[in-house]
Image (tube, coloured by chain):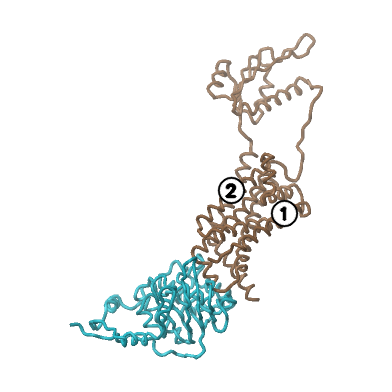
Amino acid sequence: MPEQLIASAPSMGGSPAVLDHAPLVVARDLEKSYGDVRAVRGVSFDVKRGEVFGLLGPNGAGKTTILEMVEGMLRIDGGSVMVDGVDVSRQPERVRSSIGIALQKSAFFERLALGELLRLFADLYGNTAMVDELLGRVGLQGLARRQVKTLSGGQQQRFAVAVALINDPALLFLDEPTTGLDPQARRNLWDLISRLRADGRSIFLTTHYMEEAQHLCDRVAILDSGRILALDTPLALVQKLVESGFHKDVVVWPADLEDVYLDITGKNLRES
Amino acid sequence: MSKQVRAYASLTAANLKMYLRNPVASSSLFLALIVLLVLYKVVFDGPGPRAKLVIVDATSGSAAVLVQDLRAVQAFDVTEASPQVAKAQLTEGAADLEVVIPAGFGQRDTSGRPVPVQLEVTYRPGTAGETTLAQLKATVDGYDESVLHEVPAVSIAAAPLHIRSAGPIDFLLPGIVAFNIIGSGLMVAAGTFSSYKSTGVLRRLKATGISPSIFVLSHASSSFVLGAIQTAAILVAAGLLFNVHLDLAALFVLRVLAYLVFLGVGLAISGWIKDPQRATAVSQSVAFPLIFIALLSSALPSGISEVTRYLPVSYVTDGIQQIGQGASLGGVEPDLVALVLWAAVALAAAGRVFRWE
């Protein structure tokens, strides 16, 4: 008979670097409809300063819609969002210029090199681009003359994060940042997100991967059909489930297939 | 420098950089227009086609001067042959034109006056033999006057009018410049914006919080600079090939206004249609009839031109024609006013339908 085990080792996000009591994002009763379809139904939550907040849910649950309403990228049909005290409905441009956004699929001008793009975006934000420093922070040092289309998927995602950091935002939005990446690239991006959080930034991300949420997020909201069904720390959610009598048969293996894969192929990124 | 000005300047410079790095896409249309001008020069300004003229000389040398005169005409490639051979050449197409000089040519009557003769001329219809008949007649008339001193009682002396720019190029050049403006304004704007929208580039720019007007203005500025350089090159080429001189200030203002009109139309199309392929197809469907009108504005039937004269392209071609004939800024004021109104309408429509995504 297999040994029974409650979720064991993975990090539950660790203790936040700095947690101010005043939330950075306050969303109340958010509503969004596309025609007759109510994509978001009365969603409320806060994002605290210095935390990594994750939205989890199946496809079509409303994750990206909520994220984009908070970013000021999408019109809010009902309810309200305040980002660092600014009403998103009233001043979406002001909110967008103060936050960092890495879209699910970031696209940039072709025929401009990474360094030129960073300088262009710095000008759009009214900042000065520290090109080498930014590229170094996301592990793309020495690639300032390359064009985006020549980068691997993981490098493109990290470049999108570099662009999102140009205005030195306190709040960073990452929409499914690791979708489509190989294990090395995913782990590399996790490390980057952890470093950004350690800098004291708040991060609001969406993901399909529970392992990712468990590894990165201080708190998560689980969505389905436009509603938040649960919101708490990953550990508290697991404990709540276990306390409700849930159990599953688990074979405790000292490693999983991803560990084998990384052991064989190494943890180094495969990018030229 | 304010944030808005800095964003505008940086985007404009980035756009120009991208144009320069994609020379085929940004200059193929303009180069094609330059080639069109060169071809026009070669076809319509060259020596023209030569007629193969075969002479059947039945005289015993009295027509030598006339034959010499005919040989001197550049439009004729002259040979002499017997009546049978000449007829065969004409039938087979080896000759375009046959001139039979009768035996009595050059004879004089008892009072010393030339005996009237008639040259028998046969030509192949639809060939250079037909188109050079007038030159044949002129050569024979010249022979009459110079050799026989037979001056008609009534004659005309024709001379071309010397104006600053004359000839068919006056009608072609406005069309070519309008073509360039429509290409760089309407078609490029519609294609580029739709492509940026569908790939998500516009969305990423929206995420920075910049105002749409800054983005549109920077794109308009960069493509205007590019288009102005191209128009200048077309005009320089026209000047070198056809000796055309234009009032540059008037042309600049006309071009700015015309560009704004077609940019507005292009933006409106890209705002209205998200799919880049459909936007390109629609922009071509709009552009090509306009280009047709621009190139053939002087040849359109009056019924159609009564309608097309109110289109922006007609004000562009009319304005450039006027400038080509020496008009300055004041001379094209009605065209400029009409273009201002059209630009206001087109840009207002573009503003209403503009979407980041």
Residue under pointer 1: B338
Give residue B93's quadrant in the image.
Answer: top right
Reply above or below: A190 against B137: below
The structure residue drawn at horizontal position 58% and vertical position 15%, both measured from the top left corner, is: B83
Identify which amino acid the numbered label 1 is placed on: Ala
Reply above or below: B100 against A253: above
As drawn, the chain in brown is: B
Name the mark on residue A179: none
Residue A44 drawn at (x, y percent): 48, 81
Residue under pointer 2: B288
Near mark 2 (Cα within 10 A), the count class, few <14, some 14-19 or many ≥20, is: some
What tint does the image give chain A? cyan
The structure residue drawn at horizontal position 58% and vertical position 59%, both measured from the top left corner, is: B189
Reply above or below: B81 against B159: above
Near mark 1 (Cα within 10 A), the count class, few <14, some 14-19 or many ≥20, is: some
Name the secondary structure under disc 1. Answer: helix
Residue A157 drawn at (x, y percent): 43, 73
Residue A206 drawn at (x, y percent): 43, 76
Q: Nearer the viewer, residue B136 or B229?
A: B229
Q: Nearer the viewer, residue B335 or A205?
A: A205
| Chain under disc 2 | B
Instruction: Determine the CA span between mark 2 and mark 1.
Output: 21 Å
